[in-house]
Amino acid sequence: MTPIFATDINGLLLALAVLLAGGLLCLLAGPRARLAHLLGASTAALASLIGLTAALPALSVAGSQQVALSWPAAGLNLALTLDPLAAFFLLPIFLLTFCGALYAIDYLHFPARSWRAGLHWFFYNTLGASMAVVVLAANGLVFMLAWELMSLSSFFLVTHDYQEEKVRQAGWLYLVATHIGAAFLFFVFFEASRVAGSLDFASFAALRALPVDATLLLFFAALIGFGAKAGLFPLHVWLPDAHPAAPSHVSAIMSGVMIKTALYGLLRLLTWLPPIPAWAGIAVALLGITGALFGIAMAATQTDIKRSLAYSTVENIGLIFLGLGLWLFCQATGHEQAAVLALVGALLHIWNHSLFKGLLFLGAGSVVHATGKRELSALGGLLRRMPLTGSLLLFGAAAISALPPLNGFISEWLLYLSLFNAGQDAAGGAAFFFMLLAILLALTGGLVVLVMTRLLGVALQGEPRSAAAAEAHESSAVLIAAMSIPAALCLLVGVMPQLPLQGISGPLLTLLAPNHAPTGSPLLPPFGPAWSLSLLTGLAALVAIVAIRTWRRRNASRLATWGCGYLKPSARMAYTAGSYSQFAQDTVFCSCVTPTGASTRGPALFPPPAQFGQERLDPALTRWFLPLFGKLAERAYAFRRLQAGQLSIYVLYIFIATILLLGWGIMAP
């Protein structure tokens, strides 16, 4: 073997080494849970800090640095490459890996003698390292090995509480979905290597000479393969079950960054392929906006706080694919400024979603940690008992609702600008198409506000609906610190968006090939010093108003709230999660996403107490995929007769297969 190391990438190699060594040390710690817990958290945090300091400078450095481990005798070339696009995805990976490691210090509790601590941190560190290698891979073999390692390590993290049947079911559903996607990716890389003559990404430049049909075949195969991991509708079916089943810091990483590795893979593929036809961009944009509306509608019907946030991830992935589809369409039709705005909005939303969704999952985990409950009907009144955690959750809800001065507003505003810009240049049906997308995007934003006010209003406001909620305690300083990091960055990006926009310039140039680059400067909104100064002034005024009102309330007399004629109001006299969104379910939502209910009230003259239950099933899973796989299983069962159980029959099968392969080899040109 001949190692060739580039000195500028050594920091990332060190981060990977610390992650892998830390995971192995956790296994060697054996049943000493406290030692494994300390080793796992410290090595994950240390490696993340090293990775952040190594990836940040590469974001704005043109060109790439490579490290390769070649083995000519075996025909292997294991190479990693760091360029601005890779650095763009490495930053949220290492950031949330650090926050998750910090959060898990107080969130996880293991018995004094338990192997589970070592296993958890082994898979956690492996997940962090494999995500980084997926982004750094410069070879199809390295990419798929890291992809598989990422899938397996996240599977074991999802099934952390494997004693529960629902957790096991969620884990198996995730494992099946991710491997179906991997099958399509194997096809993409095998076909690309056949055309290029190598699995090295450097040779994939030969793909730019592909005809349109072959280009579309690779693109849509990659869209299915990467879309299954990203949670793109309708391939999202694993996500609503897996994210709630996993520990909350793992949910934050899976939702915040792991699914983004699929977006990286798709973007990297687009740098190799020739221009995509305009209609394919329309298809991606329509898939994106459909997934956004479906995801947020399903989020509004969930009573599990983590499951609702998981469906919100489907919505945000839809927004990112909307931006990518607009980029491809506008690029193919000559709307250069709209294309750049759409791509910048999609890229920035990748960062933004990592921040506010990581914050929301960590905050939801703090609620579960303090109460032991995930059902909204069992919460309530938590803002008084958990003021810091509740305030950070409200902060994340405002960011995901695209409210200024937080980061979600910036990326969604760029998507609106792209639609407006393209609509002004278009005519006829194309102009109507952009107007329709803008209306649907606005409808999605309104539903996000509904979901967040429902989610946090029911959980944080009102009176406790259970003894666990009444006895809830504030999160520890470690948990608050882990949540405060993404919250601070949400505010920083919203107040000073020029900083992340400058950081995006490197990945933007990587994605915009020379024949796609705009001839003029992109029409960016006025996110300059005046924007930052006005927002800082408004924030200062808001803080002053809140401080004055708080000071006045201390000296004000307290009176009971009018109970509408009821002398003894209780926690039951409040909106539930179901009633809060009932109007939207009846008037806006499609019947396929509304819950199905059943009552047990009997027809007797003196009936017993009535019970009413609802099921919130995913229609894509129950109406499409489960019937499809059921029919496939029936067809596969017909081949069961081939399992004769006799060795001579199996030898005959091998002989027939060998003859067929020899014949194919002789007849092949």
Image: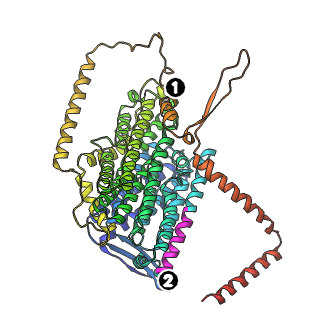
Question: Is residue 571 visible from the viewing direction of this image?
Answer: yes
Looking at the rendered structure, the secondary structure element under dot 2 is loop
Please check the rendered image and state whether residue 124 is part of the magenta-colored stretch, yes or no.
no
* 3D distance between C-alphas at marks 2 and 1: 64 Å
Q: Quadrant of residue 390?
A: top left
Q: Is 562 situated above or below 19? A: above
Using a 10 Å C-alpha cutoff, classify the residue at mark 1 as few (fewer than 14 neighbours), some (14 to 19) or many (20 or more): few
> Which of pointers 2 and 1 lies earlier in the amino acid sequence?
2
| Label 2, residues with CA under 10 Å away: few <14, some 14-19, many ≥20 | few
Give the side of residue 375 with respect to residue 67, left or right: right
Which SS does the magenta portion mostly show? helix
At 31% across and 69% down in the image, what residue appears?
516
Residue ID for mark 2: 75
Q: Looking at the picture, tell me which residue is in the foreground, 196 or 309.
A: 196
Write down the residue under mark 1. Answer: 467
Mark closer to the observer (2, 1): 2
Q: Secondary structure at mark 1?
A: helix
Residue at image position (79%, 69%) is 642
Q: Position of residue 78 (x, y in %)?
A: 44, 76
Amino acid type of disc 1? Ala
Instruction: Count the labels in the image.
Output: 2
Part of the protein shown in magenta: 181-195
Residue 517 placement: quadrant: bottom left
Residue 229 place in picture, x, y as percent? 50, 58
Q: Is residue 194 magenta?
A: yes
18 or 308, nearer to the observer: 308
- For image coordinates 61% across by 45% down, the residue present is 166
State the residue at coordinates (36%, 49%): 435
Q: Position of residue 660 (x, y in %)?
A: 71, 83
